[in-house]
Structures are given as structure tokens and as C-alpha cells.
Image: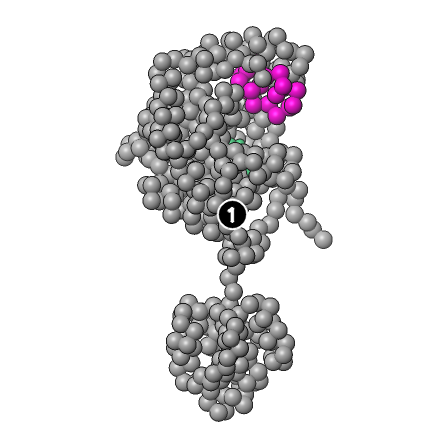
């Protein structure tokens, strides 16, 4: 038997209702805040990710699903959404109409990481991106929105961890001092960190290796190197979060695994996920639009892991499962076509119905109606039909009443009060 690929998964009925509920909540929240949905391709040119996420990141170096198209062009299954949203913003010159654009999207991402609980090779993200606003208010508002979504989905212990990565100006001095620090701990850090320590020392702060993590505890903090504008920007973000009464943690070593971030960066963590404790991550990427060939527009965004969110939400899937309103037990040659017609008309009237087309016994059909947790059963045997009415059974009260077959759908509808 052919099995699915390691790190990939099926989301089946029974679980998918929860995903639909989360997606519905996301759409209504973001749309209430003026975000528009954007749907972008899953395949993009490899260069887009290499240039935006950064050549020396784990994602680009080790995790992308990249392959040559039949004409030799290198293409990649998107490992994240921001690069594509930026590409689209530039390609369609959306900034010309209005530089301020707010987008959300929901979809699959692909990274060839080591699969484990909470970490998949195809996973889903909810993304929000705002272009054209450099005010720190929007940074705080994005964190507020993510936290609002978590509370709507009954996630109880989510907490933002925030940091500022400054601008290229503040980063210059910081990089130097971090490089110097890395040279003092060369025997404790991994080969990747050693290799990246001169060109891209920030990556060492994000290394998953435990000995690197230990070695980095005393590393310098970027917040000590912020220029006055970046420092002021970060202070305002914190101040607005306090006003929103959102408790947060300052994590001076939070840099996140992508090169494009500037100023505010954040991760939302929870205690309920075990080792993979981040449920969302994001930040500013003020230089990226320009670096990819667009105008000099600031931008900020975040990604929430939908798979992880589905694991920690307090909403219970069993409360969302859809059951048939009515099960039609058709018994006999004559009743079958009539029952089939009713079943179609029930559907058109917004009444969920289910029926058996193989002429099974009443006993076995009642069993199936029970298993499906149908609220009502319509018992339609040939004998009943001859008398001009069928039986409607309320599966909770067990009460049975006759329903005339003339205008049956309307009569049932009135009876079951949907
Ligand atoms: P990132 O794009 O790495 O900042 O990730 C943003 C969010 O996506 C994380 O906080 C996770 O919730 C989720 N995520 C990232 N990678 C994976 C993965 N391999 N499997 C499941 N969720 C993931």
C-alpha cells in the first residue's frame, strides 16, 4: 500500500471541522480589522526565498524543497509566505494605488525539517502582513490581533516574547561585538555557527543546538546597541502593549530564523506545546520591499502555526461535528426514488439528510441513523406510502408522528423547526 510521505499528514473529517472553525474565526477577525485576503502560488522561483530569507539561514541552506522545473529553472515549494506577499505587492504595483496594504492568508508551507510532534514538513500558517506603515502602533496592533485570536480560540497561556533588532545602522556595531563574542566561545559552538560567525553572526542566536544555546547566554544584547529612533520605536511598542494590558516578556536574544527582520520581532509561546513552544512568530522587515526591487516601504507581519494552534485551542472538536438533521429510512422499491427526491430537496432547504440506497432492513438502517447521531428518522416503507403518510421519529424523545407525503419537505421542516 502506498503511504503518505514522512512529515506530511492528512486532515480528515472529524479533525477538519476544528480547522474550519479556526479559519472562520481568523477571517472574521482580520476582515473586521481591514485586512484583505491574498492567495498566492505555492511554487515560486528559488531566488525569491534565497534573497529574502537569507542564503545562510537554516531554511535556505537545509530545509527547502527545491528542484529544477522541466526547463531547468530552479523552483521551490514556499517555506513561508512573506517573501511571496512582498513579491506580489511589488509585481502588481499595489503601492501605487495606496502604499498602505493589509493582507491575510492561510495556506500550506513546506520545510524539510526533522519531523516530530508539532513539526511537520507540510504545515499550515495563518499570515498577516501590513505594508506602508512604520508607526510602532501597528507593531503593537499585530501582537494584539494575534493575542485576540488566541483568546477567541480559548488558548489560555499564550505570551508574546518581544525584541528589537534595530535598523542596519544599529546592527553594524552589534554584529561586530557579537562576532567578537563568538570568537571567544569557538570551542563551544557548532560548525554552522562558526562558519556564519563573521558574515552573519546573528544566526548563532537562533541556533537550535543545545551547546550553542548555552554558549550564547552571555552574548551581547542588540537592545544595548539601538540607535535613538529604534529605541524610541521599541519603547512605544512596549507602552502600547501595556495599554492593551497584554503581558509580554523581553527576550534580548530573540532574532528568529530569517534574515529580513528589522526593529520589532516577536514570538508567541505557550507552555502547552512541549519542545515546539512557538505558536506564532513575526516582526518588521522594513528593508525587504526595497531589497526585492520595490519602493522603500516599511512592512511588518506574522505567521501563526495552524497545526500547533489546532493542538492547543480549548475549542473541542466534538462540539463542532456535523450530524444529519434527518435520516431517511427508505424501505422498498417504491419508496426509494421518492426518498431520494426528498433527500435532495432537504439539502436544498438547508436540512442535512442522509439515506441508504441499498435497501437494507429497517433494523440496520436504524442502527446507522443512531451511529450517525441523526436527530430525526423518517421511516418510509411501501405500506406507509400506500396510506399516504410516513413516520417521523424524534431520536431524542422517541416520539413518532405521521407526516403526509404531500408537501413532505415543508411539513418536516416545520416539524423539526430548523
Ligand atoms: P516561522 O516562519 O519559522 O517563524 O514560523 C512561524 C510559526 O509557524 C511557528 O511559530 C510555528 O507555529 C509554525 N511552524 C513553523 N515551522 C513549522 C513546522 N515545521 N511544523 C509545524 N509548524 C511550524
Residue 306 is one of the magenta-drawn residues: no
Q: Position of residue 42 (x, y in %)?
A: 50, 40
- Which residue occupies the foreground of this view, 351 or 312? 312
Secondary structure under badge 1?
Answer: loop
- Which residue occupies the foreground of this view, 341 or 90? 341
Query: Which residue reaches farthest bottom?
Result: 387
**What's drawn in magenta, residue-wise?**
198-216
Q: Which residue is mark 1?
A: 314
Q: Position of residue 416 (x, y in %)?
A: 43, 73
Residue depicted at x 53% and y 81%? 379
Residue depicted at x 39% and y 21%? 234
| Residue 130 visible in image | no
Secondary structure, magenta segment, majority class: helix
Q: Vertical placement of 82 versus 330: above or below?
A: above
Residue depicted at x 49% and y 30%? 267
Q: Position of residue 73 (x, y in %)?
A: 54, 32
Q: Position of residue 345 (x, y in %)?
A: 43, 73
Residue 318 sits in quarter: bottom right
- Which residue occupies the foreground of this view, 134 or 367? 367
**Horizontal side of residue 118 vs 284, given as left or right:** right
**Horizontal side of residue 21 vs 4, given as left or right:** left
**Horizontal side of residue 321 vs 112, given as left or right:** left
| Residue 135 visible in image | yes
Q: Vertical placement of 400 versus 261: above or below?
A: below
Residue depicted at x 58% and y 38%? 273
Ligand 1, by image quadrant, is top right
Q: Vertical placement of 357 versus 102: above or below?
A: below
Residue 360 sits in quarter: bottom right
Amino acid at each position: 500500500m502506498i503511504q503518505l510521505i514522512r512529515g506530511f499528514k492528512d486532515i480528515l473529517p472529524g479533525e477538519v471541522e476544528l480547522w474550519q472553525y479556526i479559519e472562520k474565526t481568523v477571517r472574521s477577525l482580520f476582515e473586521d480589522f481591514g485586512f484583505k485576503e491574498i492567495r498566492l502560488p505555492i511554487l515560486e522561483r528559488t531566488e525569491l526565498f534565497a534573497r529574502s530569507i537569507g542564503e545562510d539561514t537554516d531554511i535556505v541552506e537545509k530545509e527547502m524543497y527545491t528542484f529544477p522545473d522541466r526547463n531547468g529553472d530552479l523552483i521551490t515549494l514556499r517555506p513561508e509566505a512573506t517573501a511571496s506577499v512582498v513579491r506580489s505587492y511589488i509585481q502588481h504595483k499595489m503601492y501605487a494605488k495606496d502604499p498602505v496594504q493589509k493582507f491575510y492568508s492561510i495556506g500550506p508551507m513546506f520545510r524539510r525539517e526533522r519531523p516530530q510532534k508539532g513539526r511537520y514538513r507540510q504545515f499550515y500558517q495563518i499570515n498577516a502582513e501590513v505594508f506602508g506603515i512604520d508607526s510602532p502602533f501597528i507593531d503593537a496592533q499585530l501582537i494584539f490581533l494575534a493575542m485576540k485570536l488566541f483568546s477567541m480560540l480559548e488558548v489560555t497561556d499564550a505570551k508574546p516574547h518581544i525584541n528589537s533588532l534595530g535598523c542596519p545602522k544599529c546592527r553594524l556595531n552589534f554584529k561586530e561585538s557579537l562576532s567578537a563574542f563568538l570568537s571567544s566561545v569557538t570551542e563551544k559552538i557548532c560548525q554552522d555557527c562558526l562558519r556564519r560567525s563573521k558574515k552573519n553572526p546573528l544566526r548563532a542566536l537562533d541556533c537550535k543546538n543545545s551547546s550553542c544555546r548555552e554558549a550564547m547566554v552571555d552574548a551581547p544584547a542588540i537592545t544595548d546597541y539601538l540607535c535613538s529612533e529604534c529605541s524610541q520605536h521599541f519603547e512605544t511598542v512596549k507602552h502600547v502593549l501595556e495599554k492593551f494590558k497584554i503581558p509580554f516578556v523581553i527576550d534580548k536574544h530573540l532574532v528568529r530564523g530569517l534574515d529580513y527582520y528589522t526593529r520589532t520581532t516577536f514570538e508567541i509561546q505557550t507552555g502547552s506545546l512541549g519542545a515546539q513552544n512557538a505558536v506564532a512568530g513575526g516582526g518588521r522587515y522594513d528593508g525587504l520591499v526595497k531589497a526585492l526591487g520595490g519602493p522603500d516601504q516599511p512592512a511588518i507581519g506574522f505567521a501563526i502555526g495552524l497545526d500547533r494552534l489546532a493542538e492547543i485551542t480549548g475549542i473541542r472538536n466534538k462540539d463542532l461535528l456535523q450530524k444529519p438533521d434527518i435520516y431517511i429510512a427508505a424501505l422498498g422499491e417504491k419508496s426509494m426514488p421518492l426518498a431520494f427526491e426528498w433527500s435532495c430537496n432537504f439539502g436544498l432547504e438547508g436540512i442535512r439528510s442522509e439515506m441508504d440506497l441499498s435497501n437494507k432492513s429497517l433494523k440496520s438502517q436504524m442502527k446507522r441513523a443512531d451511529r450517525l447521531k441523526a436527530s430525526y428518522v423518517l421511516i418510509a416503507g411501501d405500506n406507509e406510502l400506500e396510506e399516504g403518510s410516513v413516520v417521523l421519529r424524534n431520536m431524542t424523545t422517541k416520539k413518532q408522528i405521521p407526516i403526509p407525503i404531500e408537501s413532505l419537505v415543508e411539513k418536516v421542516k416545520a416539524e423539526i423547526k430548523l
